[in-house]
Image (spheres, rainbow, N blue to C red):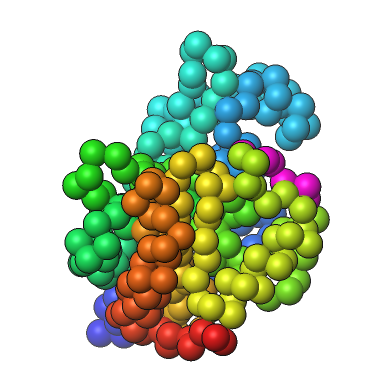
Amino acid sequence: MDSQNNESGQGRKARGRPRDWHDKTVQNTIKSLDRAMEVFEFLSEAQGKTLTGLATDLNQSPATIYRVLVTLEGRGLVEFDATEQVWHIGSQAFIIGSRFLKRTSLVDRARPIMRNLMENTGETANLGIEQNGHVLFVSQVETHASIRAFFPPGTLSRLHASGIGKALLSEMDQGRVDRFLSDAPFEKFTAFTLTQPHLLLEDLAQTRARGYAIDGEERNLGMRCIAAPVFDVHGEAVAGISVSGPTSRVGLEQIADLSKAVVAAAQTLTVAIGGEAKTPQS
């Protein structure tokens, strides 16, 4: 009887985690897997890298990096652009990430809210999260209008030139903001892009005070976006929701009404994921 109980107990441990699961020392790591993950993570931040470039940046031999890339390619985690001779993150990476998001229920809970936001405003609704200094767009409900904004799931956009990005930045602690600003001056996409720290800080202060961010043609000329942060149970901004469209429809005179709809949608999603909505300062 005791033997059977012991065997049963051992079986239960085997299904979960081993006795020494706290031990993160070298003997419990797989070096080749760790190297592959280093390449994968680096490529996720530096899209469009050549084999030579990756080998140089990671201080590894091209042969080693190539074996890693081919292995990841076999799983769809990276892709090779034969025309440009560069490597990119593959579609399977987004699929796996989407499964994580589904576990957190953020995307699932956001869909009906985004659909309602699109129908109420007539503009495309977007959902994004922060990833390594970028906004990763994870869901979108497109408007029925012929001219529309398009950010398919998996699209990355720099935080400083994105409505959702600035909404998220405005709620980060000062340490994270300072680290982000250390990369300034930022890439200039249009004449309206905020590339200098003092200009971006002024914009973030305004965003924080009113409860929503505005991307006024800062990423794409002729397009405007209004975004608001979504908060989790800890009061941290974990996502942003927005509407975006051409300036011919999303004009300055429409910002007041559209911002109310966006903030209301963000607050509804905040409550839906168990968070607590913040009241704008003004």
Along the line of sight, which residue is nearer the eye, 157 or 243?
243
Q: Quadrant of residue 268?
A: bottom left
Q: Residue at x 70, y 20 (%)?
A: 52
- Per the picture, the main secondary structure of the magenta-coloured stretch is loop
Q: Is residue 191 above or below residue 111?
A: above
Foreground residue, 48 or 13? 48
Give the x, y percent position of residue 260: 37, 75
- For the C terminus, which image quadrant? bottom right
Identify the residue shown where x is 46% and y is 60%. Answer: 252
The quarter of the displayed image where residue 104 is located: bottom left
- State whether residue 85 appears in this view: yes
20 or 70: nearer the viewer? 70
Vertical comparison of 195 with 208: above or below:
above
Q: Which residues are magenta?
A: 184-189
Q: Nearer the viewer, residue 139 or 2?
A: 139
Q: From the top left corner, tell me how far across and down residue 254 is, in percent.
A: 38, 63
Q: Please say whether residue 152 is visible from this viewpoint.
A: no
> Does residue 256 appear left or right of residue 47 in this picture?
left
Q: In this view, which residue lies farthest toward the top?
A: 83
Q: Position of residue 107 (x, y in %)?
A: 31, 63
Where residue 197 sits in the image (x, y, percent)?
Answer: 77, 58
Query: On the rendered image, what quadrant is the N terminus found in?
Result: bottom left
Is residue 188 located in the magenta-colored stretch of the structure? yes
Q: What residue is at 34 percent from the left and 51 percent from the top? A: 249
